[in-house]
Every structure is written in structure tokens, then in C-alpha cells.
Amino acid sequence: MILIFSIDGYDQCTDAVIDWLLYYGVDFLKISPKDIYSNKGKWLIDVNSHSVLYNNEDLSDKVKAVWYRKCPVPFDIIQGGNSCINTEMAFEYRGIVNYLSYIFKDKYSLGRINQDFLDKMETLNIAQQVGFAIPSTIITNDVDRILKFRDFHQVINKQINGYIKNIYYEGKNTYTCSTHSINDIDIKQGDVGFPSLFQKFYGRKEEIRVTYVEGWIYATSYLDLYDKAVDKKRVLTSSHMHVTPYKLDEDTCEKIRRFMRAVKLNYGALDFMVGSDGQLIFLEVNPSGQFLYESLLCCYNIEQYIAELLIAQDKAC
């Protein structure tokens, strides 16, 4: 059996892979946060015997391959409930998921259970160590330092922990964090207290998204000559956006493989930008990044490859 950890409801990448699993007629089970913290299913986790029963089905021996597609921590388990109780329940949920990953540790796994504990600054340093250029980056709450940094660069402000996008609700409003460009007025008028991450912005025109799956590399170019958006993912459907396959040289591919081994990921979406001299500049790696958009436009069939990879591992065990 193939076990898939993903979000509640629709997820484009999860569902595309599941379509292929259904096509091949293999046994699989998708588990979402709601399947764990609600009464949708009946769980029995026996710590002494290391066994897991879900709806009276023993998953311990039956599961041979696990795909950690997305493993978000839900902070709104009780809708409209006490925030302290929701926080405690979220940590209880995380404890259950972590133990499940421990039980399945000897099974084949694609992806990483603790996706939100991959440190962004550490990955920048590792990328640097394997030979990639990285943007000038500082973390500070010193206004003078930020202004001095801006003397040399266009500057953007990013989340320090940017892999898991928490969403917050207040009445009819929804909030999340995103990347923004900043100017001197923003800096001087802003309430700078908690240290924030500031990074050089290149006025990028071409970005490269690399989808990495077990050593296979699928590179896609995003080229927009007109839009000045800080984050190209916000304007993917722009009529000015050109999305095409991108050929990486073997030296760059080997650097990517070394990097992914160093951060202990066998799946991830890596973002680069192309500098004015043609040099690739590493921006970040997302351990649960989307791949379907690139796969469809570039005819990569990544979703089929992932399905066949999981099936092969399931049959091999």
C-alpha cells in the first residue's frame, strides 16, 4: 500500500498523482490533518507493538511506500475555539504525525515529514558551499543597518520561516505573509522591533524553477519582460509570462544533487534567478513546492513519474 500525507480537500499535485494511482489500480490511502484530529476515522496506535490501525486496517505491515506531500500543522482544529486550546491540540497533532513517521521510518519515503523545520538561512549557506551564488541577505531590527543595506541594493522583505504559509482568519478577513519590496519610507515609518529578513532584489526578469525528484531534475524558465512583480508566482497567468523548459548544464545539475543530499531531501522545488551575467543565483528550496503547472506546460509528466516511483517502491518491498 502507498500512504500519502497531504492537505484536506483538493491539492493539484496530490490529486494529479492520485489520478495515475487510480489508473494503475494500486492500493493507496491518503491521510489529511482532518483524518487525524476529527472522528472521520478510527485510530489505534499501539506504542508497545509499533502498530497502527486505521479503521481496523493494520497499516504497519501493509504500507510499503510513504509520500509526505504536505504535512501542515492545523492551528484551527476547533473553528472559532479558544486559541490556547487550538495551539495545544496542534502540538498534539504534530506529536501523532511525528510518531507515525517514526513507525514508517524503514519504509520508502518521498518528501520530508518536518517540512517546516528546514531553515532558510541554513539552506542559503549550504547552497553557497556547493558552489551556487546567493543573494546578499541580512536579518536585523536596526533601522540604520537596513537603510545602509538599501544604499547598495534594491531590497525585499521576506519571511524567515517561509516554507509553511500559515493563514490567519479574523472575521471576514484572511491574512498571510508574503514577499514585498521596501523603500526608505517603509523602513522609516515601519514599526521595526522583531528582527526581519532583508534580501537583495535583482529586478529579476527570468527565474528558473527546478523540480527535483530522486535525482531527476526538471527545470522551467519563467520569463516576463514587462511585469516587475517581486514574486513571479503571483503573476503566473499573465499574458506576458513565457513558461518554457530550461536546459541546465551537467555541472549545475550535479551541484543541485549535492545540495539536495546535504539538506536530506529527495523531493523539492528549487528557485533560482538568472543574473545579468547569466549566472544562476540560488534563492530557496521548498520541500513541498508545487510541480503540476510546470509539468503540464513543459510536458514533463512529473505526476506520472512520481506515481510510478511510488508503485515501484511499493512492489519492491
Image (tube, helix red, strand yellow):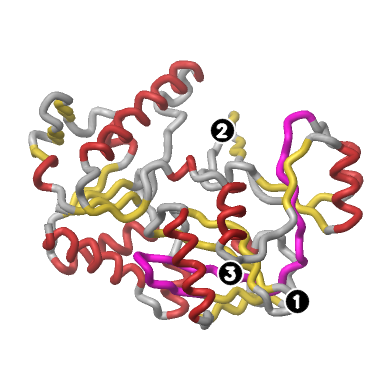
Report the amino acid beneath label 3. Answer: Thr
Residue position for label 2: 169
Residue at figure coordinates x 38%, y 54% from the top left: 11
The mark closer to the camera, 2 or 1, is 1
Residue at figure coordinates x 68%, y 51% from the top left: 179
The local secondary structure at tag 2 comes to strand
Which picture quadrant has residue 139? top right
Span shown in magenta: 193-219
Residue position for label 3: 237
| Mark 2 and mark 1: Cα distance apart in space | 41 Å
The tag earlier along the polypeptide, 2 or 1, is: 2
Whether label 2 touches label 1, CB < 8 Å: no
Which picture quadrant has residue 278? bottom right
Report the amino acid beneath label 1. Answer: Ser
| Mark 1 and mark 3: Cα distance apart in space | 25 Å
The answer to whether 128 is drawn above or below residue 94 in the figure is below
Q: Residues within 10 Å of mark 3 (few under 14, many from 20)?
A: few
Assess whether residue 201 is covered by the magenta stretch. yes
The local secondary structure at tag 1 comes to loop
Residue position for label 1: 276
Residue at figure coordinates x 41%, y 53% from the top left: 264
Residue 163 placement, left or right of 89: right
The tag earlier along the polypeptide, 1 or 3, is: 3
